[in-house]
Image: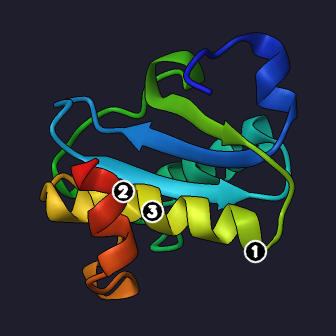
Amino acid sequence: MNTNNEGQYLTSGVYQLTCPDFDKWYVGQTGINFAREFEKHLLSFKNHSNSSRFAQHLLENDYPFGKVENVMKILHLNTKGSYMDIIEQFQTYIEIISDRQLNDKDAVTLNQIFETVIKN
């Protein structure tokens, strides 16, 4: 799913947060709705907390925290579980091998299945 509308922010799944310089992304998943997850990252930013790697990146680079429609992209709608874990890992893997991620590089290791999917 790549389209965002207000109703989708009330569901859960895998999402991407985009840095204002459009060169780095953070991939995450949430079992709560996207709007509440966005608020958690925003609160981390406002409180200068280290609970969000995305917020940390913005603070370290003196970037503003934009509006949800400009920052959050919904990648997949789903409920919490192993399927969502795999989707998040795959999306994170894509960003890590592209060197565009803000996620922890140690969170994802070389994965031959992901490599095969990406090449096809």
Is 81 in front, or is 45?
81
Identify the element where label 1 is drawn.
helix
Q: Position of residue 110 (x, y in %)?
A: 26, 83
| In this rendering, the label closer to the viewer, 2 or 3 | 2
Q: Is the C-beta separation of discs 2 and 3 under 8 Å? A: yes
Cα–Cα span, label 3 and label 1: 12 Å
Residue type at mark 3? Phe
Q: Position of residue 6 (x, y in %)?
A: 77, 13
Residue 36 placement, left or right of 109: right
Residue type at mark 2? Val
Identify the element where label 2 is drawn.
helix
Residue that carries the numbered disc 2 in the rendered image: 117
Residue 86 placement, left or right of 97: right
- The part of the image, by quadrant, that contains residue 10 is top right
User: In the rendered image of this protein, does residue 64 appear above or below residue 70?
Assistant: below
Residue that carries the numbered disc 1 in the rendered image: 82
